[in-house]
Image (tube, grey):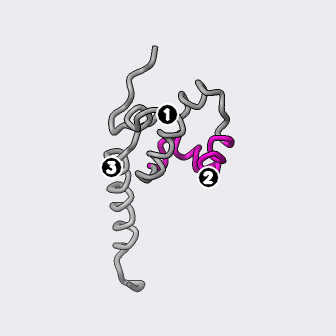
Amino acid sequence: MGANDGGTRSKDKSARTKDDDARSRDERVHNRLAVLRAARGVTRRKLAEELGIHYQTMGYLERGEYAPSLHLALRIARWFGVPVESVFSLDEFPPLI
């Protein structure tokens, strides 16, 4: 692609970004990590240490910016002593109150 690509590169990039945004909304994994952490009185950093991950990764997970691998999701559920479905869901969790 050179100077005569007619700007298709930037259009393609824009289209991919919209597609990626739509896909990420469709593939979002919801979680109750912050609620479970608060109930256990554990900090994000401490839980990350316990799980062997970076504390920033825990923040990405809690905000739904990162979907955990199956292995990590199972380890998190085991740490809390609950089924994985109690921590992660493809649908939004209903409010607790």
User: Do tag 1 and tag 2 residues touch (Cβ < 8 Å)?
Assistant: no
Q: Which residue is mark 2?
A: 52
SS type, badge 2: loop
- Within the magenta stretch, is there residue 28? no
- The disc placed on residue 81 is 1
Q: Which residue is mark 3?
A: 22
SS type, badge 3: helix
SS type, badge 1: loop
| Residue kind at label 1, given as amino acid type | Gly
Please give the name of the residue rendered at 37% of the width and 35% of the height, measured from the top-left corner. Answer: 85
Query: How far across and down, in percent of the image, does residue 78 sit?
Result: 49, 40
Judged by depth in the image, the label closer to the viewer, 1 or 3, is 1
Query: How far across and down, in percent of the image, does residue 28 sit?
Result: 38, 44
Q: In front: 93, or 22?
A: 93
Judged by depth in the image, the label closer to the viewer, 2 or 3, is 2
> CA–CA distance between discs 1 and 2?
17 Å
Q: Neighbour class for label 2 at 10 Å: few (<14), some, many (≥20)? A: few
Q: Earlier in the sequence, mark 1 or mark 2?
A: 2
Please give the name of the residue rendered at 63% of the width and 45% of the height, measured from the top-left corner. Answer: 50
Please give the name of the residue rendered at 39% of the width and 58% of the height, measured from the top-left corner. Answer: 17
Drawn side of residue 73 relative to residue 4, left or right: right
Image position of 85 with respect to 26: above or below: above
Q: Earlier in the sequence, mark 1 or mark 3?
A: 3
> CA–CA distance between discs 1 and 3?
33 Å
Q: Which residues are magenta?
A: 45-67
Q: In front: 58, or 9?
A: 58
| Residue kind at label 3, given as amino acid type | Ala
Q: Quadrant of the N terminus?
A: bottom left
Q: Earlier in the sequence, mark 2 or mark 3?
A: 3
